């Protein structure tokens, strides 16, 4: 199947051709016809499967057929990074189409707020927004949503995990009841099912690779003491001929320290965390996407908010606290049918958490031997090491 089979408008096809898109992914193949048929959707699709295009392309096509002077579509995303990513994809797909859009998210200055207000009052066709920033505008009374036809919730599970449930319900209160609603989530816990029953009408259900890392990801793990982690990371990164590498750590303090240590050793590295101003975050992400930075050290702020091709290696310096976050972290590599490597460092008290990850993905991740000269690591015994630190930790 190719995108020609959807019979998109000419200006949308020109955008797809210019971006080198020819063959839809499974989520696109299943979701696009349903969306074009004006059905509600609840779709479970992991990171890297092409879900952003799955909902953007049919919306752009509808607006190409019938241009609008009003806010037609609202896309809600949990983080500013994801909102920016969606907006960038949207601008590429709609380059030749009569479609206007804007991303609305916190952390910008007063000038940006005025630009957002202008777009919301004068009717940008597609609004991509984080919940808190959008509510700030809605509370002021000038946002007109009466012509809205489509509501899209992206990464809905993450939004609920971040405590946005009340915000989502408040935003929905401003929207027309007659609309098409599309809910996309990487996982499908009971709280997502509850939300879907509340906001969707007879939805079509689509499931793509539920809670499984992409097939192209080669997974491995090292069982280590915390005191061994930095040395192991430096050895893994040294001499790696890879265009892009991401190292995930659980705290911003760890991220800052790792950046300092790697810079001392002349690695081409930069860090991104919540203490950075938004403008600096954008700059770091842009340089990483453009291959000016080889290695990015990040907190989980990035696990669902970056879209970069050919990330060859993902390192989980710390085991993620939520087993489902592992899927999103390793989903940064092996995107769009490519291949990649995901390695995890497991200290004694994280062994039980990693065991839950293996139970979630339905397979055991191979435990790799530590390099020579590092000394022995701890015993891997998840049942015994249930959150109790060892002496060498």
Image: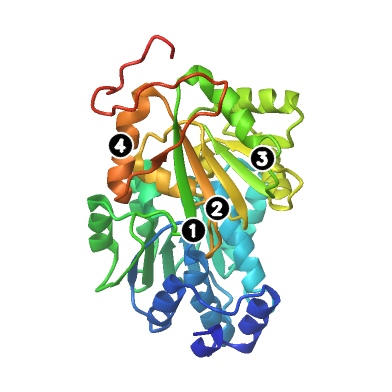
Contact check, label 2 and label 4, Cβ < 8 Å: no
The residue labelled by disc 2 is 340
Residue 79 location in percent, x, y?
A: 51, 47
**Residue 233 lies in what quarter of the image?**
top right
**CA–CA distance between discs 3 and 4?**
28 Å
Residue 216 image label? 1
The residue labelled by disc 3 is 295
- The label nearer to you, 3 versus 2, is 2
Query: What residue lies at 74% left-to-right and 26% top-to-bottom?
Result: 265
Residue 71 location in percent, x, y?
A: 53, 69
Quick one: label 4, few (<14), some, or many (20+) residues within 10 Å? some
**CA–CA distance between discs 1 and 3?**
21 Å
Name the image quarter holding the C terminus.
top left
The kind of secondary structure element at disc 4 is helix
The residue labelled by disc 4 is 355
- Report whether 259 appears left or right of 105: right
Query: What residue lies at 35% left-to-right and 35% top-to-bottom?
Result: 354
Name the N-terminal-most of marks 1 and 4.
1
Residue 150 location in percent, x, y?
A: 43, 71
Q: Is residue 297 above or below residue 364?
A: above
Name the N-terminal-most of marks 2 and 1.
1
Residue 228 location in percent, x, y?
A: 52, 21
**CA–CA distance between discs 2 and 1?**
6 Å
Contact check, label 2 and label 1, Cβ < 8 Å: yes
Name the N-terminal-most of marks 1 and 3.
1
């Amino acid at each position: 199947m190719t995108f020609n089979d959807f019979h998109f408008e000419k200006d949308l096809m020109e955008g797809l051709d210019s971006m080198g898109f020819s063959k839809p992914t499974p989520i696109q193949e299943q979701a696009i016809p349903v969306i074009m048929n004006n059905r509600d959707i609840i779709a479970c699709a992991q990171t890297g499967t092409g879900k952003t295009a799955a909902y953007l392309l049919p919306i752009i096509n509808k607006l190409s057929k019938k241009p609008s002077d009003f806010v037609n579509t609202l896309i809600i995303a949990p983080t500013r990074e994801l909102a920016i990513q969606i907006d960038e994809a949207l601008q590429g797909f709609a380059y030749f189409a009569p479609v206007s859009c804007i991303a609305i998210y916190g952390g910008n200055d007063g000038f940006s707020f005025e630009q957002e207000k202008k777009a919301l009052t004068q009717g940008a066709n597609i609004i991509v927004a984080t919940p808190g920033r959008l509510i700030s505008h809605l509370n002021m009374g000038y946002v007109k949503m009466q012509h809205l036809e489509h509501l899209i919730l992206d990464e809905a599970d993450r939004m609920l995990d971040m405590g946005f449930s009340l915000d989502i319900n408040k935003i929905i209160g401003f929207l027309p009841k007659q609309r098409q609603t599309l809910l996309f989530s990487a996982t499908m816990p009971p709280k997502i099912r509850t939300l879907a029953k509340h906001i969707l009408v007879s939805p079509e259900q689509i499931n793509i690779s539920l809670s499984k890392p992409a097939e192209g990801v080669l997974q491995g793990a090292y069982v280590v003491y915390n005191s061994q982690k930095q040395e192991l990371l430096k050895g893994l990164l040294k001499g790696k001929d890879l265009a892009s590498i991401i190292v995930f750590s659980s705290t911003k303090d760890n991220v800052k320290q790792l950046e300092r240590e790697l810079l001392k050793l002349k690695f081409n590295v930069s860090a991104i965390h919540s203490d950075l101003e938004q403008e600096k975050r954008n700059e770091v992400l842009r340089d990483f996407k453009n291959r000016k930075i080889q290695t990015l050290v990040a907190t989980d702020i990035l696990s669902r908010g970056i879209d970069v091709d050919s990330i060859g290696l993902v390192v989980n310096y710390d085991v993620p606290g939520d087993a489902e976050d592992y899927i999103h972290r390793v989903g940064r590599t092996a995107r769009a049918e490519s291949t990649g490597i995901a390695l995890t460092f497991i200290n004694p008290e994280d062994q039980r958490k990693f065991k839950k990850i293996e139970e979630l993905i339905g397979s055991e991740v191979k435990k790799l031997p530590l390099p020579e000269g590092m000394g022995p690591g701890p015993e891997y015994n998840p049942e015994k090491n249930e959150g109790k630190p060892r002496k060498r930790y």
